[in-house]
Amino acid sequence: MLFLCASVFSGTCFAQDDSATSEPPTTAQSEATSSQDEAAVEVETAAEATVANRINDQFGVVVGYMASVLFWDPVPGEVTVPLIVLILLFGSVFFTFYHGWLNIRGFIHAINVTRGRYDNPSDPGEISHFQALTSALSATVGLGNIASVAVAIQMGGPGAVVWMMLLGVLGMTAKFHECTLAQVYRKIKPDGTVHGGPMYYLEIGLQERGLPRSVGKGLGVVFAIFCIGGSFGGGNMFQANQATQAVIGLVEDSGLVKDAGDYRWIVGCVLAFLVGLVVIGGIKRIGQVTEKIIPFMCGVYVLACIVILTANASVLADTVVLIIQSCLNPGAAYGGFVGVLVLGIKRAVFSNEAGIGSAAIAHAAAKTDEPVREGVVAMLGPFIDTVVICTMTALVVIVSGAYKDPDAAEGIAITQLAFAGTVSWFPVILAVSVFLFAYSTMISWSYYGEKAWQYLFGQSQSVKLSYRIFFLIFIVLGAIASLKNVLDFSDLMILSMAFPNVIGGIILAPKVKSLLNNYWARYKNNEFKTYR
Amino acid sequence: MPLSYSTVIVPVDFSGESPAAIQAGLEVVDDASHLHLVHVLLPLDAMSPGVLLGDVSDESRQENVSKNLAALAKENGAAGAVRAVLFGTPGLEITDYAKQQQADLIVIPSHGFHGMKRLVLGSVAERVIRYADCSVLVLRRSDAE
């Protein structure tokens, strides 16, 4: 700021000196003026860059301290294996076996429920099964599918794809479990709206199981804190960071603006404004259109990936072989087998949110009187998000070789490179997809985070407004921070939600199993009324 | 102090204390028609799935609350009470409504919050006491947190 003032002051003084004389400036004087102006601009840009860098550096320090606690590594060895990753892996495997591989045997039923076969409009809730899935997908399908996958392959090699897909499949049952619980313990308010999610089923469900109320309440509070952090991190900063990068990349490639990276804060402010129109301005029309476009955009994105893969069909078989070989023997450069496994798990969970409980907040609002039915629908989320969309991104990145390109920066830039390699204007489709996915993810996660905020601080307009203002500030912060800091913070918060969620979920597992067995017996007996 | 009041407002939040508040209101009016049961809804969340994808609106919320108010009134012997659904900040809306109706008394349960919620929310009862033009009877909650 001092530099800015100095430059303005010196400019003003010179102008006064200039106007004090009646003679026109000489060429030497003009050149001196021009070089002083350039110096002033450089100082101004340097000052702005310094402020942004300082914010980013301080943010990195804070994230480092948090990681030393939340990502504690209990496994000896060179490769870092955070405890939370082990919990997530164990939870997904446990729920899958405990519920008898419902992700496989219940898949067709999930499709039929989502198509509306059992939709009864007079059932309690706010939205249909399909709308609940769309709402959850609009939160999960975002930059995690497009940029985070590229990061995983760049860091872990092609083998990371296998572990991502595996966690996508196993995560389907984890998501079924938490969404069923959300339906069981949801609260329907007198105005017909719904409150639900892990904070409620932890508080009420664990007390029902005979544990002291303080245990369930404590876990509910811990979950709410991490959910708020997750809404600021993965649901906000990461989206803003990569959406900004996509826009900046496009602008720089077009040559329209020099050093476009210096204007990241502008993109951040625009994004914050657009999100603010919905969350604070209450202009729901924008949000409604965006949410409804998301399924269409998923289709467009997948189609673009298919075009790229078709264009590279000759190397597709070799790519699959490479993926499998890299999975089994990734090499020390990628951290070995364990390193790639940990990376694949982190990126899969970051993308599909299975096991962390966030989607349960949306699925709690579905219209149904059968909790298991909504849980079954929720299973489709990780399948669409990870098994389909993430895998598409991964194949495109590997087939194109973009992840090996030494000039490829990181994150979204790798995916942009992959898209540009086949059709020159595909990056435009990618940029539009990225922006819309990021925007819808931020809208959806602002809902999750606000529900958690209200759980902690109560329901009032001032409580809601305070959260929303913080949310918008974090958008701008995400736009200017480095990808590393943003990703580290996002991972910390999002994955830590699994601590209370998986632990509480395992304690409540017998309840869900009992409900599932009862439901499945009635389903097999054709006892459910159909409406379509 | 009069033994009965001509217009009594009872804010209803559908908590466990609402029936007791309605009963307390009935005891100080000659007829249930002098009782006004009022519920205040906070403004809609524009980013909730029900608003973005479903049919949730202020109209649907108002309709649901009206039905629930009618049922609660009937269960507690106040079927003839006036029922009102308002939108906005509870403390202010209740006192504004009481002023419009020229109410003599507001009967309201306290929330009994402690800790963080008490610090952040305060209580609607405190705001009603501060802004009301008429007498306010605050009922202590038996299950205060």
Image (tube, coloured by chain):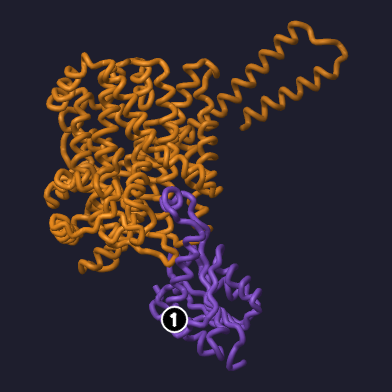
Chain colours: A orange, B purple
User: Would residue B98 appear left or right of A413 to someone viewing this image?
Assistant: right
Query: Which residue is found at the position 18% from the left and 45% from the top?
Result: A103
Quadrant housing the N terminus of chain B = bottom right
User: Would residue A94 appear left or right of B129 to someone viewing this image?
Assistant: left
- x then y, percent, for residue A331: 16, 23
User: Would residue A260 appear left or right of A361 to someone viewing this image?
Assistant: right
User: In the image, is residue A137 above or below residue A219?
Assistant: above
Direction top: furthest residue: A27
Query: Which residue is found at the position 28% from the left and 43% from the top?
Result: A381
- Is A362 or A133 nearer to us in this picture? A133
Viewer can see residue B91: yes
- x then y, percent, for residue A456: 41, 59
Q: Quadrant of residue A515?
A: bottom left
- x then y, percent, for residue B89: 56, 64
- Is A347 or A442 nearer to us in this picture? A442
Question: Residue beneath label 1, please?
Answer: B74
Classify mark 1: helix, strand or loop: helix
Query: Which residue is found at the position 19% from the left and 48% from the top?
Result: A91
Quadrant housing the C terminus of chain B = bottom left
Query: Which residue is found at the position 23% from the left and 27% from the top?
Result: A156
Chain bearing mark 1 = B
User: In the image, is residue B86 above or below residue A279?
Assistant: below
User: In the image, is residue A84 above or below residue A17?
Assistant: below
Amino acid type, callout 1: Lys
Direction right: furthest residue: A22
